[in-house]
């Protein structure tokens, strides 16, 4: 099985509603029961981010998001699926559950 990152994209700092959280819980339970679950988490707002650039001599720490954008990553799932088609089907179900757009990207093995 391959692993995929499903990023939840959102254009607001608003948290999920109670109804959305209930739907996400049902989706998460189904992922676990069907053997697709690896990990999932919500993220704090972009304003809580710290960007670190350690490419030079001393690392530079900056408050806030690196990119100014209308959308940000609000959460994520890491799932296991037999192939991309299965991952996309699962991601579509996750998008419906959380009521947000999602992006799917394969994880590269190390």
Image (tube, grey):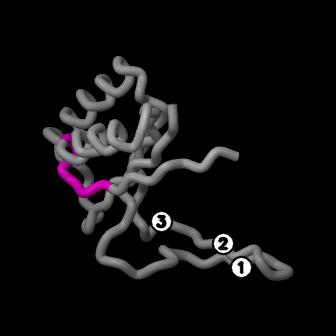
Q: Please give left or right for residue 60 compared with residue 104 in the image.
A: right
Q: Are marks 1 and 3 in contact (CB under 8 Å)?
A: no
Instruction: Give the mark nearer the N terminus: 1 vs 2.
Output: 2
Q: Residues within 10 Å of mark 3 (few under 14, many from 20)?
A: few
How many marks are shown on the rendered structure? 3
Secondary structure of the residue carrying tag 2 is: strand
Which residue occupies the foreground of this view, 55 or 44? 55
Q: Nearer the viewer, mark 1 or mark 3?
A: 1
Q: Which mark is residue 60?
A: 1
Secondary structure of the residue carrying tag 3 is: helix
* Residue 23 place in picture, x, y as percent: 19, 35
* Residue 92 place in picture, x, y as percent: 24, 45
Q: Nearer the viewer, mark 2 or mark 3?
A: 2
Q: Are marks 2 and 3 in contact (CB under 8 Å)?
A: no
Determine the image quadrant of residue 13: bottom left
* Residue 56 place in picture, x, y as percent: 80, 81
What residue would you read off at disc 3?
48
Q: CA distance from mark 2 to mark 3?
A: 13 Å
Region of the chain picked out in magenta, as a range: 97-102
In reply to whether residue 52 is colored magenta, the answer given is: no
**Relative to 43, residue 83 above or below:** above
Q: Residues within 10 Å of mark 2 (few under 14, many from 20)?
A: few
Q: In the orientation shown, which residue stands out farthest toward the left?
A: 19
Residue at 45% across / 53% down in the picture? 105
Q: Are marks 1 and 2 in contact (CB under 8 Å)?
A: yes
Instruction: Give the mark nearer the N terminus: 1 vs 3.
Output: 3
In reply to whether residue 99 is colored magenta, the answer given is: yes
**Relative to 41, residue 102 above or below:** below
Residue at 45% across / 48% down in the picture? 5
Secondary structure of the residue carrying tag 1 is: strand
**Relative to 11, residue 14 above or below:** above
């Amino acid at each position: 099985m391959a692993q995929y990152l499903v990023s939840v994209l959102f254009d607001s700092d608003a948290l999920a509603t109670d109804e959305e959280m209930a739907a996400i819980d049902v989706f998460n339970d189904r992922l676990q029961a069907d053997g697709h679950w690896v990990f999932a988490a919500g993220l704090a707002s972009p304003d809580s981010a710290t960007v670190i650039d350690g490419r030079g001599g001393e690392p530079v720490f900056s408050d806030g998001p690196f990119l100014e954008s209308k959308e940000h990553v609000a959460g994520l799932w890491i799932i296991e699926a037999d192939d991309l088609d299965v991952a996309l089907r699962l991601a579509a179900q996750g998008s419906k559950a959380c009521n947000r757009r999602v992006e799917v990207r394969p994880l590269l093995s190390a």
